Amino acid sequence: MSYAHTVTVNVSFDEAVRMAREALADQGFGILTEIDIQSTFAAKLGQEAADAVGDYLILGACNPALAQRAVTADPGIGALLPCNVVVRRHAGAGETTVEALDPAIMAQLSTKPEIEQVSIEADARLRAALAAVLAGATQ
């Protein structure tokens, strides 16, 4: 089972992060959290561990309207919010990967029928954001 939607683009890590932020904002997502895995690994595990993972940023994206509908339908679904979007690039790699958690996971884990509709809408928005990143990289 696939748990993420992924695009790989031939742009720098910083450019991919910028493009992902803009594409997510265009789809109504704000960034609630940001985790710099490389910096965290360097601080907690040493530079060798950080170098092994390369550039790796987790953006905790949230579309408030969709999140409100999901939490209202199933208060426990908050454990799956926000939607994580990862931008990663291994040292020396020529390409950067942008991937988003597949919202269908929410529908598979919840017994509430309203969650399926929210997951469908979130999926469409996340796929559109990834498509925009891909399109922007090829211009």
Image: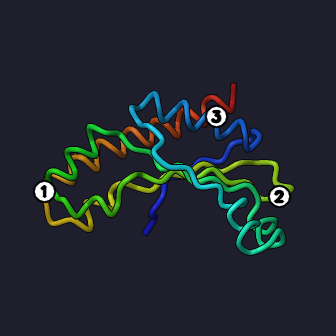
Closer to the chain start, of discs 2 and 1, is 2
Secondary element type, mark 1: helix
Give the residue type that dot 3 points to: Arg
Residue 53 in the image, given as x and y percentages of width and height:
74, 65
Q: Which residue is drawn at 63% across and 53% down?
A: 57
Label for residue 18? 3
| Disc nearest the viewer among 3 and 1 | 3
Please name the residue that numbered disc 2 is placed on. Answer: 91
In the image, which is nearer the foreground, mark 2 or mark 1? 2
The residues bearing labels 3 and 2 have C-alpha atoms spaced at a distance of 19 Å
Residue under the point 57% across and 38% down? 20
Q: Quadrant of the C terminus?
A: top right
Using residue 54 as the reference point, say whether residue 58 is left or right of it: left
Q: Name which of mark 3 and mark 1 comes first in the sequence.
A: 3
- Amino acid type indicated by mark 2: Ala
Looking at the rendered structure, the secondary structure element under dot 2 is loop
Q: Which image quarter: residue 3?
A: bottom left
The residue lying toward the viewer, choosing from 139 and 18, is 18
Give the camera-side residue of 89 and 39: 39
Local SS, label 3: helix
Label 2 and label 1: CA atoms lie apart by: 43 Å
The residue depicted at 56 percent of the width and 50 percent of the height is 34
Label 3 neighbour load within 10 Å: few <14, some 14-19, many 20+: few
> Which residue is under mark 1?
113
Image x and y of residue 70, in percent: 22, 50
Please state if 51 lies on the left or on the right of 63 as rendered: right
Label 3, label 1: how many angstroms apart (C-alpha)? Answer: 35 Å
- The residue positioned 83% from the left and 68% from the top of the image is 47
* Amino acid type at image mark 1: Pro
> Is residue 66 shown above or below 92?
above
Residue 30 picture location, percent across and down:
44, 37
